[in-house]
């Protein structure tokens, strides 16, 4: 009986990327594949030089580009509502993947 094993890793630009290994013997044939359109969890952390506010819940998006669009919309909402503190500190919104890897920083 041949076994197939899916080995995957998230890739911020291409979605989930992985390798389908056919068989469990050494040298088994591998086929690189890509899962497209599967939602990924992204976390939006707010950081200044002294404070870090972690987003533990996160949001789902189909890609990093979509997560950046959501983050930019959130920043605009915070600015419009006055939630951005009028201080001399510089704030950034950091986008992390579900494994905690930093993917992008945006100025707030």
Image (tube, grey):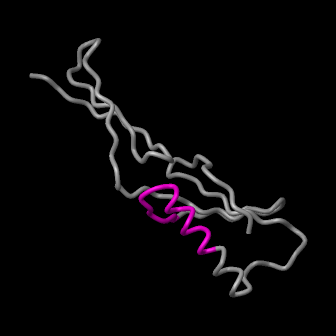
Where the N terminus falls, by quadrant? top left
Residue located 38% across and 58% down the image: 39
Question: Where, by quadrant of the figure, is residue 28 drawn?
Answer: top left
Question: Where, by quadrant of the figure, is residue 89 drawn?
Answer: bottom right
Number of marks in picture: 0
Please provide percent x and percent y for residue 79.
71, 81
Taking the view exactly as shown, the residue that stands out farthest to the left is 1
Indicate whether 23 appears above or below 58: above
**Residue 59 magenta-drawn?**
yes
Image-based side of 107 in relation to 21, left or right: right
Question: Where, by quadrant of the figure, is residue 84 drawn?
Answer: bottom right
**Residue 11 magenta-drawn?**
no
The magenta region covers 57-74
Residue located 47% across and 43% down the image: 11
Provide the major secondary structure of the magenta segment.
Answer: helix
Please provide percent x and percent y for residue 104.
64, 53
Indicate whether 59 appears above or below 33: below
Indicate whether 94 appears above or below 30: below
Indicate whether 6 appears above or below 58: above
Residue located 28% across and 12% down the image: 26
Image-based side of 88 in relation to 101, left or right: right
Nearest to the observer: residue 59 or residue 34? 34
């Amino acid at each position: 009986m041949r076994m197939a094993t899916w080995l995957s890793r998230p890739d911020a630009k291409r979605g989930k990327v992985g390798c389908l290994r056919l068989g469990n013997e050494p040298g088994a044939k591998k086929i690189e594949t890509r899962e497209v359109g599967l939602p990924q969890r992204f976390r939006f952390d707010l950081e200044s030089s002294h404070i870090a506010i972690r987003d533990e819940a996160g949001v789902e998006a189909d890609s990093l580009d979509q997560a950046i669009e959501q983050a930019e919309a959130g920043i605009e909402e915070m600015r419009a509502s006055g939630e951005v503190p009028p201080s001399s500190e510089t704030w950034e919104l950091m986008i992390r993947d579900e494994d905690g890897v930093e993917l992008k920083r945006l100025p707030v």
